Amino acid sequence: MISSAHARTVANLAAASCLALLLGACGGGFSLPSLTSSSPPPEAEPGVAPEMPATIRGDEIVGRWGLASFQNPADRARTEKMAREQCKNPYVITAGSSGGVIMHLADQATPQELRLKGSPSGKNYIGPAGPTPGEQDREIVSFDGRVMITRFIDKDAATRYGNMVYVRCAPRA
C-alpha cells in the first residue's frame, strides 16, 4: 500500500510533468499572453519625429567661424565679441561628401559628417542620421548667416558646453 506522503509526491511530480508537456507544446496554436511573440512593435518615443529637411542648408554654415560659449543669456553680446576674436584660430566647418557638414560631436576628438535636420516644430538640428532630436544632436537656437548659436540636446553636454556661439570670420560676400 502507498502511504499518503508518497502519493502526494507522486501527484506533484505528475502535475509538474503535465505542466512541462503543456508548456513545451505551446509552439502549436496555443499561446499565453506573456509568452507570445506576435505583440505589436513598440511605438516611437513621444517627441521624437522622423528625419525631415532643415530650413538651413549645409552650404550656409560651411566656412571659418570664431567660437565661444556662454551659460547666462546676459553674456551673449560679450560672448559674440569673444568669438569674433577667435577668428585668428577659427573653427572650420567643411562640406561633407553626402550633403552634410563636417563637425565635432560632443566629447569627440575626430570630426565627422553630420546632417542638418528639421522638425515639425520648425526647429533645426545638426547631428548624425537618426531620429530628431537625437541625444547627440545640437539645436540651432538662432542663425542669421553671420552668427549661429547652438545648444546640445544631451543635458550633460549642454551643461558643460553651454550655448555655442559661432561668428563667421570671412567678410560678407
Image (cartoon, rainbow, N blue to C red):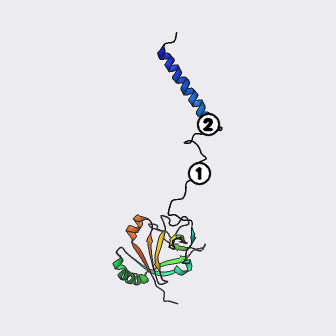
Q: Position of residue 160 (x, y in %)?
A: 38, 68
Tell me which amino acid carries mark 1: Pro
- The quarter of the picture where residue 17 lies is top right
Q: Which residue is mark 1?
A: 40
Total numbered labels? 2
Q: Which residue is more in the foreground, 61 or 29?
A: 29
Determine whether the residue tagged by mark 1 lies in a helix, strand or loop.
Answer: loop
Q: Earlier in the sequence, mark 1 or mark 2?
A: 2
Determine whether the residue tagged by mark 2 lies in a helix, strand or loop.
Answer: helix
Q: Which residue is mark 2?
A: 26
What residue is shown at x 61% (from left), y 36% (from top)? 26
* Vertical placement of residue 34 versus 83, above or below: above
What residue is shown at x 60% (from left), y 32% (from top)? 22
Q: Which residue is more in the foreground, 57 or 105?
A: 57
Q: Position of residue 134 (x, y in %)?
A: 50, 65
What residue is shown at x 47% (from left), y 70% (from top)? 138
Q: Which residue is more in the foreground, 142 or 15?
A: 15
Q: Which residue is more in the foreground, 62 or 17?
A: 17
Dot 2 crowding, Cα within 10 Å, few <14, some 14–19, many 20+: few
Tell me which amino acid carries mark 2: Cys
* Vertical placement of residue 14 versus 95, above or below: above
Q: CA distance from mark 1 to mark 2?
A: 20 Å
Q: Residue furthest right?
A: 28
- The quarter of the picture where residue 82 lies is bottom left
Dot 1 crowding, Cα within 10 Å, few <14, some 14–19, many 20+: few
What residue is shown at x 59% (from left), y 51% (from top)? 40
* Vertical placement of residue 61 versus 49, above or below: below
